Amino acid sequence: MKGRKTLNKTSKNNFITMGGLLLVYVIVLILKEGGITTNLINGQLVPICAYMLMAISLNLTVGILGELSLGHAGFMSVGAFGGVLIGTLMQEVSDSKTLCLLVAVIGGGLLAALAGFLIGIPVLRLRGDYLAIVTLAFGQIIKSIVNILYVGLDADGLHVGFIEKPEILEDGKMIINGAMGATGIRKISTFTFAFVVLMLCLIVIYNLIQSRTGRAIMALRDNRIAAESVGINVTKYKLLVFAISAAMAGMAGTVFAFNYSTVTPTKFDFNTSILILVFVVLGGLGSMRGSLIAAALLTLLPELLREFSDYRMLVYAVVLILVMLGTNNAKIRNLVAAFISDIKSMFGGKKTKKEEKTNG
Amino acid sequence: MDKGKIHEVISESIIPARDKDKRPVLECSHLGITFGGLVAVDDFNLTVGPTEIAGLIGPNGAGKTTVFNLLTKVYQPTHGTIILDGQDTRGMNTMQVNKAGIARTFQNIRLFDKLTVEENVKIGLHNQIKCSTVSSILRLPSYWKTEKEAHEKALELLSIFDMQDMADYKAGSLPYGAQRRLEIVRALATNPKLLLLDEPAAGMNPSETAELMENIRKIRDTFQIAILLIEHDMNLVMGICEGIAVLNFGRIIAKGSPEEIQANPTVIEAYLGKKKED
C-alpha cells in the first residue's frame, strides 16, 4: 500500500507541474489575444518555450543520467538547420503551415537524435570531466560545419556545397548560406505549437522517469558498478538517453528557428550551451519543474531589465549570483520551506473544516 | 611452506553430501589475475554445490574481494576458467554474468541512494519483469501490468527481511544494517543461482548477526540457491558455512568443513603468525 502512495505523490507532483504549465499557457494566451502583453514579450514566447524544452531535455542527461554535457546547443543547431531545410522543402509541396512545421520538427528531432546517437558511441567510454570536454568539442564542430555549409534550392533540385557556395539558377534561393546561416525563413512557429511540443516532451520525460527504463537510468547515475551487477545494460541506456535528449533539443531548435526570418550558426554556440546548463543547475538537477521556471525567468529577465540599458547584463549577472547563493543557503531554504509549509497548513486546516462540514 | 602438502589439502572436496551427485553451480579452475607485476590471485580452484553455503575467509588483503570481482567480471581474469552452472563465462561482462546467474553484494555498500527502497529492489527485477521503453512512455496496458507485478514482487522480496514497511524510504537514509539487508534483497531480485555476499555482517551487532545467519539459511532453503560469502565474523562463518576455503596472499591455503579449518595448522599460522620456537 505504501508503495502506491509514493507513486501517487510523484505523479501528483508531475501533474501539478503540467497543470501549472497549462495554466500559464492559457493566461499568457488570453493576455496576448487581449493585446495586453507588449510586442517585445510576444516575440519572446516561442523562444521561451524552446529554451524550456532545451532545459528539460538537458536535465534528462545531466540530472537523471548524471552525465555532464556542455554541447547541448549543438543538437539544437542540428535541429534548427535540419528542420529549416526540411520545412522549406515541405513548403514547396504543401501550403499548410502546421503540417510543414510538424514535419520539420519531427525531421529536425530525428536528425538531432542521430547526432546524439553518434556522439554517444565514442563518449560511452568516457565519464565526468572527459565526457564534458568531448561534448563541448562536439558543439564547436557542429557550429563550424554549419558555418561552411551551403544548401541552395532551384528548379534543378537541391545543391549542397561545403566551403564553396554552389551555383544555383536565378529563380532559386539559398536555404542555408554558410556563416550567414538560414535566411528567408517563413516565420511559421506559433506560441501554441511551441507549447504543444513542450508539453508532449514533458509528458514523455515524466513517463520515462517513472518506468523500468527510467529506474535503470537513475541506477546508472547513483552507482554504475551496482547497476551493472544487477544486469543493467549501461551502453544501451546511455545511448538511449543521449538520443532522446538530443531529439528534444533538435525539436526545440526547429521551433526556435521558424520564429525568426534569419538564424545564424553563432546563435547555437558554447554560450548557449552554458546558458541552458545554468537553467538546469539553477532549477535543480533532476527537477523538471525547476528547469522550466528557471528557463522562463532567465529568458525573460534580460528583456525585463531593458530599462537598465547598458547595465542590463551586469544586473542579470548579479541577480543570477544572488539566486544561486539564495537557493544554496540552508537558512534561506529553511525560511522558504517554513513559509510553504505555513501555506500548506493553512490550506490543510481549511480542508479539514470542510471535511467536518460534509461529515456533519 | 611445503607445496605438496598444500595440494593435498586442496584436493579435499568441500561440497556437502546432498549436492555430491548434482552439477556444481560454480567451478573455478586455476583462476588468477595479476595487476602489473603484482599477483593478486593465483591458481584459485573452487567448486560450489547448487545449494551449498560456502565461506571464503582469510586475513585482510588476502584477495577475497578480488575473487568476487573476478567472478562478477569487474576484473577480467588473466588466467583460468569460471564455469557457472555448466556455462563458461569467458568473455562475459558484469551484466552478462548477472544474467547468467551470479548476483552479489558489496563490501562498501553500493545502493542507489537517491532512490527509494522499493525502487532499489525494482531495479534488481530489471531483467525479471520487462516492459519496453515505448510502452512505458505511451503508458500502454503492459506498463501498468508490469509495474503492478514489480511492486508486488518487490514487497514480497522485502518481506524476507521484514523491510516492507521501509519501502518508501530513500535507500541512503536507511541505517547501516538495513542497507546491508537491502543489498541482499536487491541481489536476490535478479533471480541468481549463486549469491555472493561480501562481508554481510560487517558493522552488525551480535543479535543482528544471529538474525542474519537465520536469514541466510532461510534464503538458501526458500530459493534453493548457492551462497558464497566472505566474512570476518568467525561465529557466522563456522555457524552456517558447510564448506570453507581459506585464502592467504592470493592463494588457497586450506579447504574443508568448519571443524577441519579450525584445526588446520596452516590456517592458524596465517591468522596468528608462526610460533617463535618453530
Image (spheres, coloured by chain):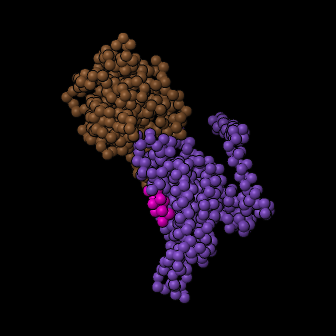
Chain colours: A purple, B brown
Q: Position of residue B261 (x, y in %)?
A: 31, 18
Can residue A200 be found in the magenta stretch? no
Q: Position of residue B192 (x, y in %)?
A: 34, 36
Q: Give the residue at x 29% y 27%.
A: B52
Q: Give the residue at x 52% y 85%.
A: A168
Looking at the rendering, in which quadrant would you find the C terminus of chain A? Answer: top right
Q: In the shown orientation, is residue A193 left or right of residue B223?
A: right
Magenta segment boundaries in residue numbering: A111-121
Closer to us: B260 or A106? B260
Can residue A112 be found in the magenta stretch? yes
Q: Position of residue A39 (x, y in %)?
A: 72, 69
| Up/down of B235 relative to B112, above or below | above
Q: In the shown orientation, is residue A105 left or right of residue A29?
A: left
Q: Going by the picture, which residue comes out furthest to the front?
A: B277
Closer to us: B137 or A213? A213
Closer to us: A18 or A142? A142
Q: Position of residue B71 (x, y in %)?
A: 34, 37
Q: Give the residue at x 36% y 11%.
A: B277
Assign the magenta stretch its main secondary structure.
Answer: helix
Q: Quadrant of residue B57?
A: top left
| Up/down of B51 relative to B120, above or below | above
Can residue B188 be seen here? no
Q: Give the residue at x 43% y 54%.
A: B134
Q: Quadrant of residue A8?
A: top right
Can residue B49 be seen here? yes
| Up/down of A118 relative to B219, above or below | below
